Image: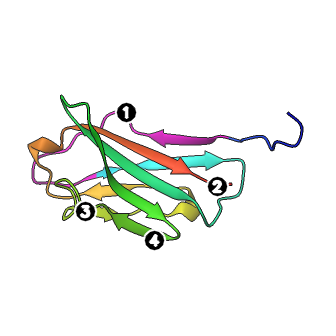
């Protein structure tokens, strides 16, 4: 349709599998690439889906230039933001790994408009 601006995708790259030892820490890396400049409104959200469950919870959010650790789940005391959106990096670190941390972590990046 005329007048609609084309949407250019953001490509997000994460490791397929990350292994960690109970009690140690692990970095969940998330890098992204966009042909557009990275706007001030960029947002990054990490979700976690525990192994064997269907529910996914949001555990971390970066928006308006600020990192927010979501106040749910078992990660809130153990999570560290190590990303830098200007360097197209949305990585987090999880400290003091527990067996229940097994599951799927998803990194979602939005670069409006």
Residue beneath disc 2: 112
Please identify the quadrant where the N terminus is shown: top right
Alpha carbons under labels 3 and 4: distance apart: 15 Å
Q: Which residues are magenta?
A: 9-26
Mark 1 is surrounded, within 10 Å at the Cα level, by few (under 14), some (14 to 19) or many (20 or more) other residues, namely few
Mark 2 or mark 3: whose residue is earlier in sequence: 3
Q: Nearer the viewer, mark 2 or mark 1?
A: 2
Count of numbered circles in the view: 4
Residue beneath disc 1: 16
Residue 71: image tag = 3
Mark 2 or mark 1: whose residue is earlier in sequence: 1
Residue beneath disc 4: 66
- Residue 20 locus on image (x, y percent): 19, 44
- Residue displayed at 45% across by 62% down: 62
Relative depth, front residue between 50 and 28: 50
Mark 4 or mark 2: whose residue is earlier in sequence: 4
Check contact, mark 1 vs mark 4: CB within 8 A.
no
Secondary element at tag 1 = loop
Alpha carbons under labels 2 and 3: distance apart: 25 Å
Mark 3 is surrounded, within 10 Å at the Cα level, by few (under 14), some (14 to 19) or many (20 or more) other residues, namely few
| Direction from residue 38 to residue 106 in the image, left or right | left
| Direction from residue 33 to residue 76 in the image, left or right | left
Main SS class of the magenta portion in the image: loop
Alpha carbons under labels 4 and 2: distance apart: 16 Å
Q: Is residue 101 above or below residue 71?
A: above
- Residue displayed at 72% across by 52% down: 36
Q: Quadrant of residue 52?
A: top left
């Amino acid at each position: 349709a005329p007048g609609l601006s084309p949407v250019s995708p953001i490509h997000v790259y994460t490791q397929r599998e990350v292994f960690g030892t109970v009690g140690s820490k692990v970095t969940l890396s998330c890098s992204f690439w966009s042909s557009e400049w990275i706007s001030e409104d960029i947002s990054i959200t990490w979700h976690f889906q525990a192994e064997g469950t269907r529910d996914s919870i949001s555990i971390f959010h970066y928006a308006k230039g600020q990192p927010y650790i979501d106040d749910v789940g078992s990660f809130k005391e153990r999570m560290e933001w190590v990303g830098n959106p200007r360097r197209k990096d949305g990585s987090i670190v999880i400290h003091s790994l527990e067996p229940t941390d097994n599951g799927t972590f998803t990194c979602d990046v939005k670069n409006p408009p």
